[in-house]
Image (tube, grey):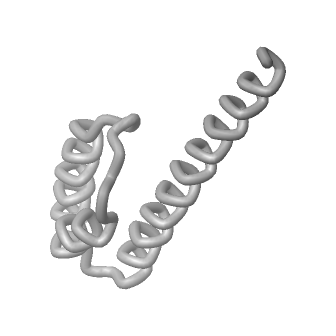
Amino acid sequence: MEGDTEDLSLIHARQTTVSLNRQIDSHTQLVALVSCELPSNFFRLLLFLAGDIHARVTKHRQWLATEAAKTQHTTSS
């Protein structure tokens, strides 16, 4: 039980060092890095899904920025 707490503290410490605004090129690298410390496939799956969601949100934000730029260009013409 005490070992589990230490493992979670280590993971939490590593997570806090990663900037939330940082773009992750390949979330599979993140999953590989963290999954070696997580014994449960459930947590590996969660990390994979989190990376996938992050990629989709980033892509959607880029699309929104492109659409906003198009709208701004159209209204200024």
Say which quarter of the image contains residue 41.
bottom left
- Give the vertical position of 23 relative to 72 (above or below): below
Query: Viewer-proximal residue, 11 or 26?
Result: 26
Where does residue 67 sit, x and y in percent of width and height?
A: 71, 39
Camera-nearest residue between 28 and 65: 65
Q: Quadrant of residue 23?
A: top left
Q: Is residue 77 left or right of residue 2?
A: right
Q: Residue furthest right?
A: 75
Image: 42 above or below 60: below
Q: Residue at x 43, y 62 (%)?
A: 51
Q: Residue 5: x and y, percent?
A: 24, 56
In the picture shown, does residue 32 fall above or below 10? below
| 65 to 5, vertically: above or below | above
At 48% from the left edge and 66% from the top edge, which residue is drawn? 52
22 relative to 69 in the view: left or right: left
As drawn, the residue found furthest toward the bottom would be 41
**Residue drawn at the location 23% of the way across and 48% of the way down:** 9
Residue 21 coordinates in the image, percent (x, y): 39, 35
Quarter of the rendering containing residue 25? bottom left
Residue 11: image location, x then y, percent: 23, 53
- In the rendered image, the quadrant that contains the C terminus is top right
Q: Is residue 55 left or right of residue 41?
A: right
| Residue for point 60% across, 43% down | 61
Total numbered labels placed on residues in the image: 0
Q: Nearer the viewer, residue 60 or 38?
A: 60
Q: In the rendered view, does 67 fall on the left or right side of 49?
A: right
Q: Residue furthest front?
A: 77
Q: Quadrant of the N terminus?
A: bottom left
